[in-house]
Image (cartoon, rainbow, N blue to C red):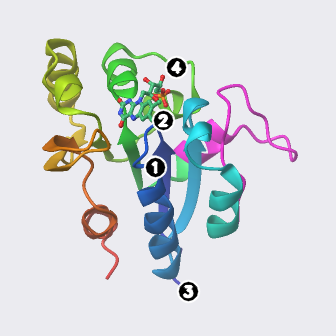
Amino acid sequence: MAIAKRAVLGIGGGIAAYKVAFLASRLVQKGVSVRVAMTPSSLQFIGPVTFAGLTGSQPILSSTQVDADGSVPHIDAAQNADVYCIAPATASILAKLASGAADDPVALLALTMKCPIIVCPAMNDAMWHAEAVQANVATIKRRGVEVLGPVTGHLAEGYDAIGRMVESEAMLERLLEVLQVQ
Ligand SMILES: Cc1cc2nc3c(=O)[nH]c(=O)nc-3n(C[C@H](O)[C@H](O)[C@H](O)COP(=O)(O)O)c2cc1C
């Protein structure tokens, strides 16, 4: 039997986090093994129980987490991953990726991953256009990180502009392409 492809999903603190629950569900339905990592802020937007239920494994919630069986999840998850997708990729996460910070599990995993990394930014248009954010995006792209979106559409602020995270279907399509899963 073929070994299941493995995706790790890193969740940042933005409203668009709800879209990643759908993504996780669809990946699991496609036979992909999914492990989730969550920043502390993301817990304000979506609960770890949702991802535990959808994926069958406990999310990684801390950069110093050691699982009950003694394994260190950021090392195990990174060793086996076929793709790492960070969504919503907040301005803060983009800054951490650009600088190499490792003080939350999502950023830490980005340093330990050997597989392709895809980030899906989500933020309002002012944040997206900020010079610091654009510089961070340019830095991580130069290092080979794929940046999917953002798109122009309805923002939580109540108007249409650039900054909306791509939809779950677009993330799913790209991840399945990278994983070579039909
Ligand atoms: C309602 C609400 C929505 C937010 N949405 C976003 C967002 O879409 N993008 C973003 O960069 N920050 C957003 N923020 C701010 C982040 O939650 C904040 O910068 C946080 O520190 C990000 O932490 P993290 O990147 O470690 O998850 C939002 C804050 C609030 C209160």
- Residues at marks 4 and 1 touching, judged by CB atoms closer than 8 Å: no
Of discs 2 and 4, which sits in the foreground? 2
Residue position for label 4: 102
- Ligand 1 closer than 8 Å to label 2 CB: yes
- Residues at marks 1 and 2 touching, judged by CB atoms closer than 8 Å: yes
Q: Spatial distance from mark 4 to mark 3, Cα to Cα?
A: 36 Å
**Residue 17 numbered tag:** 1
Question: What type is the residue that disc 2 sits on?
Answer: Gly
Question: What type is the residue that disc 3 sits on?
Answer: Met
Q: Which residues are magenta?
A: 56-78
Instruction: Name which residue lies at 31% across and 82% down.
Output: 182
Q: What is the secondary structure assignment of the residue under circle 3?
A: loop
Question: What type is the residue that disc 1 sits on?
Answer: Ala
Q: Spatial distance from mark 4 to mark 1, Cα to Cα?
A: 21 Å
Vertical relation: 153 (above or below) 23: above
Q: What is the secondary structure assignment of the residue under circle 2?
A: loop
Residue position for label 3: 1
On the rendering, which quadrant does ligand 1 occupy? Answer: top left
Q: Spatial distance from mark 3 to mark 2, Cα to Cα?
A: 38 Å
Residue position for label 2: 13
Disc on the earlier residue, 3 or 2: 3
Vertical relation: 29 (above or below) 45: below
Classed neighbour count for the residue bearing mark 4: other residues with Cα under 10 Å, few (<14), some (14–19), many (≥20) = some
Classed neighbour count for the residue bearing mark 2: other residues with Cα under 10 Å, few (<14), some (14–19), many (≥20) = many
